[in-house]
Amino acid sequence: VNWGWMLRYLHMNGASFFFIAVYIHIFRGMYYGSYKKPRELLWILGVIIFLLMMATAFMGYTLPWSQMGGWGATVISGLFTAIPLVGDSIHTLLLGGFTVDNPTLNRFFALHYLLPFVIFAVVGIHVWALHITGSNNPLGIDVKGPQDTLPFHPYYTSKDTFGLGVFLLCYVGVTFFAPNLLAHPDHYIPFNPMQTPA
């Protein structure tokens, strides 16, 4: 595939950098107390988005069918067997059999493709909930009028544009000059169910 190496590295590092941005967003929300009343629904929706993102990233991690991905799928899917009564059924349904094999890869690929659309829908609800309650701020001041706010442009647009530029510069720098910085060498070894990663 022409430029396939670039697409793979952009996608692989893009997922890692996307999680960096999400962690910054979560820690900002925790620092500002955005989980407190009246923004509980907003926080719960954020947690749902985070869990869906983790599921999507995990399934994408297994798709190269490497030692790390295959054994990661084996270990993480095995956690479902700890659920009383229905755990074994969930495990078999998720894997498409009793072990990680081709049906697992097909199911994980389908879910890796479909879950971002679910995430997009929940993000829409998350933004709607934000507009209902309003944004939180570091001072904890409830907005009562225009005197309590700043215009979005030019204050926030210039700050956000600068932050986005620095973030994208780091992302492009890692992707093109150190593409395996956030990867493990075993991720390039084909999956062998008879040998665990070192």
Image (cartoon, grey):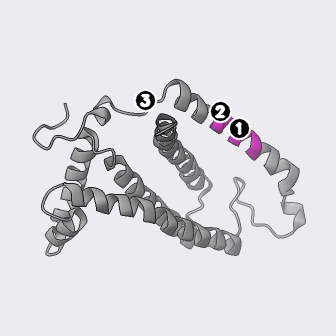
Residue 77, position in %: x, y? Answer: 23, 58
Vertical arrangement, residue 52 with respect to residue 85, above or below: above
Does 165 appear in magenta? yes
Camera-nearest residue between 161 and 192 = 192
Confirm or deny contact between disc 1 and disc 2 (CB under 8 A).
Answer: yes
Residue at screen point 70% across, 40% down: 163
Residue 152 image point, x, y percent:
83, 56
Residue annotated with mark 3: 180
Q: Residue at x 87, y 49 (%)?
A: 154
| Within-10-Å neighbours for mark 3: few <14, some 14–19, many 20+ | some
- Give the magenta-colored segment's residue range: 160-168
Q: Secondary structure at mark 1?
A: helix
Task: Provide the secondary structure element on which disc 2 rests.
Answer: helix
- Report helix, strand or loop for mark 3: loop
Residue picked out by circle 1? 165
**Three-letter amino acid code of the residue under disc 1:** Gly
Tell me the quarter of the picture where residue 148 sits. Answer: bottom right
Where in the figure is residue 32, as x and y percent of width and height?
62, 55
Name above or below for residue 164 compared with residue 153: above
State how far apart marks 2 and 3 are (Cα): 17 Å
